[in-house]
Amino acid sequence: MNTVAPAKSMPVPLRLVEEELSRQMKALQGDDESPVHRAHMSNLVIFCDEPELAESVADDVPEIVASHPARVLLVIGEPETGSETEGVTASVIVRQMKQGRHERSLSEQVTLHASGSAVNKLAFSVRALLIGDLPINLWWAARQPPPLVGPLLYDLAENAQQIIYDSLGWLEPARAVSATSTWLQQFEQNLPGGRWRVASDLNWRRLKYWRRMIKQALAPGAVAAAMELLVEHGPHAVIQAWELVSWLTSQLGWKAQAGKIEQGLEIAWQFQAPDGPVRVRIRRLPEGPSEILLLRLQCNLAGVPSAVAIRAEDSRRLVAQQEGAGTAPNTLNFQPQPRAELVGRQLSDRERDPVFSASMAVAQELAKSLLD
Amino acid sequence: MTITNPIEVPKSLVPLPCQLVIFGGTGDLAWRKLLPAVYNLNVEGVLPAHFAVVAFGLPAEGPTQADPDEFMRGRARDGIDRFSRRDLDESHWNDFARSLFFVQGSFNDSRAYAQLKAKLDALDQQFGIPGSRVFYLAVPPQVVRPCVEHLREAGMIHDPSEQAAFTRVIVEKPIGRDLDSAREVIRIVGSAFAESQTYRIDHYLGKETVQNLLVLRFANSIFEPLWNEKHIDHVQITVAEEEGLAQYDPNTGAMLSTRAGYYEGVGALRDMVQNHMLQVLCVVAMEPPWSLAPEVVRDAKVGVLNCLRPLTRDDAEKNVVRGQYIEGEVHGQRVTGYRKEVRKSFEAMNRELPPGSVHSTTETFVALKLFVDNWRWAGVPFYLRTGKRLPKRVSEVAIQFKNVPQVLFNSHPDVPLEPTVLSVRVHPEEGLSMRIASKLPGPKIRIYPVKMEFNYSSSFGNKSPEAYERLILDVMAADATLFMRRDQVDAAWKFVMPILDRWEQVRARDLPEYQCGTWGPVEADRIIEPDGRSWRNL
């Protein structure tokens, strides 16, 4: 399904939003007799705390709704800004998505903006614009971790079944991971009345192919004889690396014992594995893409030092190789995962992931070892 | 004497020549609903050729010095301009206006009735009407008695056996403010009109989607076998309004009109639950009638009311929650709380605020749980919720089916599948939808809820007729199916009386509060959440 170039977003009084949506839909129908469907699987509320961020998110919306048609409420709240809007302003846009020669679908986006104390009014506006009986997803696109933002999150997440956040680029990773892990345990507790909700991190989704490759490339013998695990990542990807380490060590049953941050570039932990101690390091490279670039497991196989390395060769291929063995590398190809695609897929994926929960429990232990 | 037309075979839904006499013709209901409804019927061409409308009453600002008929035509035109589902068309308006008249007078003044009678007799001659009348009592309950008595004294009520020159009366809600006063209104009307001449209106029953509930249930083979306690988990009936008491100019914020004079001291239970919501409940829960004859359908409806589990004092405490709105946000506008709005409304009406209203405990929100104790609905809770100043205007009936067993696709106890829901929307877009679980496209089995929708306007094009159009037409055609029989009114009041008695007994100084623009007080959750259910996202 492709999106067609949209009309311009129209400012409109809040009470006339639905009418404006209908008007734009009718205009897009035109005189054409081919049917036009209003497609929506869910309500997607997106929260941004900066207009620039909202612009970049808005660019993603057409692709998101192409894979997961939704009523999009793009909410921009700037509580800290110096200026204060009088209330909540709204603009509306209807996009046409081509499905085929004779069928077309429309998707709708309402952008709400408030600053200063008017941010408190956003939840009221959102409530009135949700489509009944459809699941509600909240994409927390702000740069702050959800648990550190206060009541606004809960106001916007009222009745939401899923909160999607992205830990890429979070500052103060230990504090952020610790707070988020604690929050996740509370947030995902089932609510009264048979209601439930899940939280999903896009960074976890990004690790899908890494986890798949690791499962295939690490031989049990190498793991048993592991001495050191190194994960290198580009700028802003420290939590991605953290989550990968948490996942891997939780799967292997390694127990974290102590950790420290070294010169702001590297975090190191001492783990106790079933066969002995293992050192685990996460190292930030000064440049490169914001993703994991290397995982290297150093081991001692029958007294011979050895290592297995998995590298991101580019944005669509992982290559695993046992160093010095002269064997051919194993590769795993995949399509790049832009943010819009990650969000689109995550929206339809509302099952709780026990592996993620177990990994985050370990991530919290790792964070504690640094904060204590 | 009955005169029959030899070339016309009487059949249902053929409105017969008559004059529609609107008591309270200068009031809000006539302005906003009744006159626009009759205009639309005229445009549709479904009114009898021999027909006239006569408004009766006094303007709120006192008697007009202008030509009364022209005064009423101006007011009607304004109402049609603002509220009609169709834009005003000059040629249709001119045709309608020439049959619209006004008799000024007080409901307590016998001379006014003499004038009214003279006017009606003259119009009979002018329009070739055989003396038939439909008296629409769009007046408060306390005015019903003088209206009925004066009509009788003026000799304007014909015998019910009279077919050609029939007399019928439409009684608007509220029919009383409790069981005793309702019985009194029924008795007064009954002293002059036979039950067959009496049409107690509840405009919700005239809405297309409410009528469609009958069709949905009894014209489709898939629903009725599932329509029982074996398959239905619970039913939710919601009537949510954005508006508070008053209507405001969206640009200036100035108060345009207010219902405070009626609503204050009445509240949501009397205004919505006792009539509209219980009537809708009847349509949802009734047994299949053996025919569509009015009395048969009404028997089936009253059967539901008779099966309502009476509320004990304890039930009235545990299963009913009321609330009152406080300041909040609606459509980005700061709106005042109920008490302040009442105060401002009385100021705008130049009326003194009743002492009891200073610290008003009139409820603007009610949620309750009830049971229909019969074979079909045993153990199935019905949750009713209504309120003012909620986030959006939406009215619906939702039938939530039982969930599938926790095997196969529903095997995650922490994240159960959303159950199947059939929802019938009365507002904002009339129609119905069914939420079902569907597999998402792709190699993995992933289940996602989807909505199959039927929308009246997108399927049938034109906007549905207003409820009042259908109901006025039904009275002219003597079809009482959609009107409340006296035993229905009685049974509905009987059901709510324990709640009113309880509230009277408690004499709360403050009610649970909810901010304008939210879904009611949090206390409403305590009715439903302990049952493992929750209010629907609307």
Image (cartoon, coloured by chain):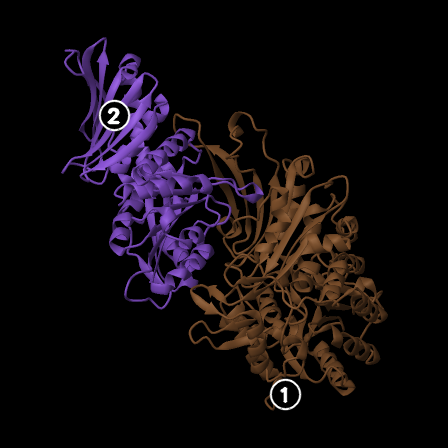
Q: Secondary structure at mark 2?
A: strand
Q: Say which residue label 1 marks.
A: B62
In the depicted structure, whether residue A315 falls above or below residue B187:
above
Q: In the picture provided, is A104 more to the left or to the right than B25?
A: left
Q: Say which residue label 2 marks.
A: A279
In the current view of this chain or complex, which residue is farthest to the bottom? B65
Percent of width and height locating residue B239: 59, 57
Depth check, front residue: A333 or B196: A333
Position of the N terminus of chain A by quadrant: top left
Q: In the picture provided, is A292 more to the left or to the right than A12?
A: left
Q: Which chain is purple?
A: A
Q: Chain of mark 2?
A: A
- Mark 1, Cα crowd under 10 Å, few <14 / some 14-19 / many 20+, is few
Tell me, yes or no, if residue B209 can be seen here.
no
Please tell me which residue is depicted at 53% across the width and 25% down the height of the picture: B408
Depth check, front residue: B3 or A52: A52
Q: Quadrant of residue B403?
A: top right
Instruction: Tell me the distance, in whole angstroms, between the alpha carbons under discs 2 and 1.
Output: 93 Å
Tell me, yes or no, if residue B281 can be seen here.
yes
Q: Which chain is brown?
A: B
Position of the C terminus of chain A by quadrant: top left
- Amino acid type shown at disc 1: Gly
Percent of width and height locating residue B458: 48, 50
In the depicted structure, whether residue A276 falls above or below residue A71:
above
Percent of width and height locating residue B343: 58, 78
Depth check, front residue: B5 or B257: B257
Please tell me which residue is depicted at 36% across the width and 45% down the height of the picture: A139
Nearer mark to the viewer, of 2 and 1: 2
